[in-house]
């Protein structure tokens, strides 16, 4: 897969998330609640909670909202929250992988299936798309917190911690690592005190499919509608996000 396509897909996801700030907060609250529920409310001893809080701060979530989410987790209010995934196809054979967090599995399954059906897709069985995506660690950092003048030196330093690619997009630096080196890179970036606005494991398509603009727009309608669902956290697909498609959106 061409690098352009990969980062175009990431950039599209970021733009979609930025437009749905309330949705970003909803996702972050769920992540914090689950992390606190499972391993306690101390960010110093709970790496999952530390990561969730870091991402929440990167999204400019107020401190009191973060604290309420932690109390919700340790207080047992998030006991019914579970993380689930869905795999299916949009029109023209475009693979779509959906990650969700829900307190009502039946509601979420029905909603996701309905969106697939309504917009020309079909919900498949879990495990059917695994070979089309690779799990990668993706870190988004503020460019002004890094010595951009010595970017080559920065890259050389980070190779020992699993760096695969480093890309500049607008005012941010995107760092990609292997799945296995994700934690190692997180630890190293924490030591450097760089401003991390988000870090997560993403599913990157191994190859992408280019469609005519009209067909691609139909696929994006399904993806956009799926992103509106409150239970859905992230959506990954193997559609080639071309400049023409980006402009049309």
Image (tube, helix red, strand yellow):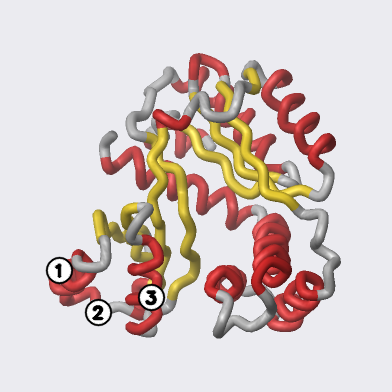
Q: CA distance from mark 1 to mark 3?
A: 17 Å
Q: In this rendering, is residue 197 above or below 100?
A: below
Q: Which mark is residue 131?
A: none
Quarter residue 174 falls in: bottom left
Q: Secondary structure at mark 2?
A: loop
**Mark 2: few/some/many CA within 10 Å (<14, 14-19, 20+):** few
Q: Secondary structure at mark 3?
A: helix
**Mark 1: few/some/many CA within 10 Å (<14, 14-19, 20+):** few
Question: Mark 1 or 2 closer to N-term?
Answer: 2
User: Residue 202, percent across and down?
Assistant: 46, 49
Image quarter where the N terminus lies is top left
Judging by the rendered image, the residue that carries numbered circle 2 is: 147
Image quarter where the C terminus lies is top right
User: Residue 232, percent across and down?
Assistant: 68, 45
- At 58% from the left and 76% from the top, the residue drawn is 46
Question: Mark 1 or 3 closer to N-term?
Answer: 1
- At 70% from the left and 63% from the top, the residue drawn is 34
Residue mark closest to the camera, 3 vs 2: 3
Question: Mark 3 or 2 closer to N-term?
Answer: 2
Q: Nearer the viewer, residue 66 or 125?
A: 125
Q: Are marks 1 and 2 in contact (CB under 8 Å)?
A: no
Quarter residue 183 falls in: bottom left
User: Residue 26, percent across and down?
Assistant: 72, 59
Q: In this rendering, is residue 162 above or below 231?
A: below
Residue mark closest to the camera, 1 vs 2: 1
Q: Which mark is residue 156?
A: 1
- At 20% from the left and 67% from the top, the residue drawn is 160
Left or right of residue 58: residue 171: left
Q: Secondary structure at mark 1?
A: helix
């Amino acid at each position: 897969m061409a690098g352009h396509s990969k980062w175009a897909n990431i950039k599209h996801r970021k733009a979609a998330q930025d437009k749905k700030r309330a949705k970003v907060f909803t996702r972050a609250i769920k992540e914090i609640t689950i992390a606190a529920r499972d391993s306690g409310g101390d960010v110093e001893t709970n790496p999952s909670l530390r990561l969730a809080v870091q991402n929440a701060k990167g999204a400019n979530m107020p401190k009191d909202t973060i604290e309420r989410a932690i109390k919700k987790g340790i207080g047992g209010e998030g006991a019914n929250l579970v993380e689930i995934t869905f795999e299916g196809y949009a029109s023209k054979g475009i693979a779509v992988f959906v990650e969700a967090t829900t307190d009502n599995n039946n509601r979420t399954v029905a909603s996701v299936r309905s969106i697939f059906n309504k917009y020309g897709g079909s919900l498949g069985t879990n495990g059917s798309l695994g070979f089309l995506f690779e799990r990668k660690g993706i870190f988004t950092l503020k460019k002004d917190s890094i010595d951009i003048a010595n970017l080559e030196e920065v890259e050389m330093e980070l190779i020992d911690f699993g760096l695969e690619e480093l890309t500049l997009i607008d005012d941010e630096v995107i760092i990609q690592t292997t799945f296995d080196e994700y934690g190692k890179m997180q630890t190293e970036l924490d030591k450097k005190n760089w401003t991390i606005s988000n870090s997560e494991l993403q599913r990157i398509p191994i190859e992408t499919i280019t469609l005519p603009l009209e067909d691609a727009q139909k696929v994006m309608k399904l993806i956009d509608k799926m992103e509106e669902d409150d239970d859905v956290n992230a959506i990954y697909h193997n559609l080639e996000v071309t400049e023409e498609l980006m402009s049309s959106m």
